[in-house]
Image (spheres, rainbow, N blue to C red):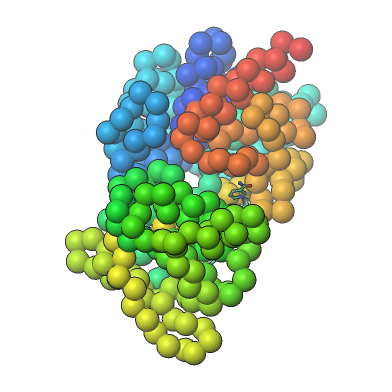
Amino acid sequence: MLDTVIIGSGPAGLGAAIYASRAALDYVVLEKAGYSGGQIVTTNDLDNYPGMPNIDGASFSMALQEHAEKLGAVIKEATVTAIERNDDKSFTLKIDGQDDIITKTVILATGANPRTLNIPGEAQFLSHGVYYCATCDGMFFRDKVTAVIGGGNTALEDVLFLAKICKKVYLIHRRDELRGDKHSQEKIFALPNVEFVPSAVPKSIKGDKKVTTLEIELQKTGETKEIAVDGIFVAVGMIPNNKLVPDFVATDKAGYVIADETGVTNTAGFFVAGDLRTKALRQVITAASDGANAIKSVTDYLNA
Ligand code: NAP
């Protein structure tokens, strides 16, 4: 029986793997994609991970995998289909087309993905003017014009972040009332370079090699309008990759596994790391740190 199985090989999963090797645990990393890195693979420039300036997401992912493997990580391509709890408190992982794996503990690190708008141009201009993380990519739009789409706290924080960098920021929201907190709204409405466009539904994103235009429909008049922008930041929520979260593990209303930075869940022996857990900041740096913390929790549990 293994000490732990890490499911997911993004920064949280491989952060955990690096610490699992150092703790001499008997473990394996399972990844359903044929490559490591998770969301970060498709990021153009990472730029906010300490010590790694000017690195693109794919190179970072490869470096992460090489580092983990150099320390002894075994990363197996495997699609886990279910996680069951056994009477002796171990776990059985059901795996598509492969033998079951039995383990004393599980670290689930399957992440979350940004919700997309599903409008024409969105996928085409991904990383060429369309982004899902202003903290990661906003700095490439110094003195440019950007639009943030969404009305929740993430969108408001993105606007506050971008307003410091950009010449102008449009806040495009599908209703006339913002969902995010009033304090942030007040700060935004006081900024001279932010324009709130309420009751506006994004219809398409246009450009040549890069984004040039956001087309919106104004709900109150039915009028279609084109806004000239250099960058668009979509902030319409995240979708946790929680298909594997068993019934016996508690999640919040949005589907994130309830846990603090220790990764300890309501179920003994079942840990979570990275974007899949309840947290305020979903970034590579916080995911990697979660991986390390989860291994500390696993070793504490195994030694207890
Ligand atoms: P969110 O609160 O779910 O907001 C998503 C926003 O996107 C909503 O305004 C929603 O509009 C809009 N939206 C959803 N689907 C859309 C679509 N297809 N087209 C256009 N607009 C769409 O998500 P979030 O802002 O990522 O925040 C997630 C959670 O984290 C929230 O609980 C939030 O408070 C929390 N958070 C907290 C902080 C903080 O405390 N500092 C920072 C960031 C996030 P409607 O309003 O019309 O539904």
Looking at the image, is 1 positioned above or below residue 112?
above
Q: Is residue 107 left or right of residue 206?
A: right
Looking at the picture, how far across and down is residue 55, in whole percent?
A: 29, 33
Looking at the picture, how far across and down is residue 84, in whole percent?
A: 70, 37
Instruction: Look at 76% across and 33% down and name the residue there.
Output: 267
Q: Quadrant of the C terminus?
A: top right
Looking at the picture, how far across and down is residue 220, in whole percent?
A: 53, 86
Residue 41, by quadrant, is top left
Instruction: Look at 31% across and 65% down and name the residue there.
Output: 229
Q: Nearer the viewer, residue 155 or 88?
A: 155
Residue 90, by quadrant, is top right
Q: Ligand 1 sits in which quadrant?
A: bottom right
Q: Quadrant of the N terminus?
A: top right
Which residue ends up furthest to the right in the rendered image? 87
Looking at the image, is 43 positioned above or below residue 29?
below
Q: Nearer the viewer, residue 30 or 263?
A: 263
Q: Nearer the viewer, residue 4 or 49?
A: 49
Q: Nearer the viewer, residue 105 or 226?
A: 226
Instruction: Look at 56% across and 10% down and name the residue there.
Output: 23
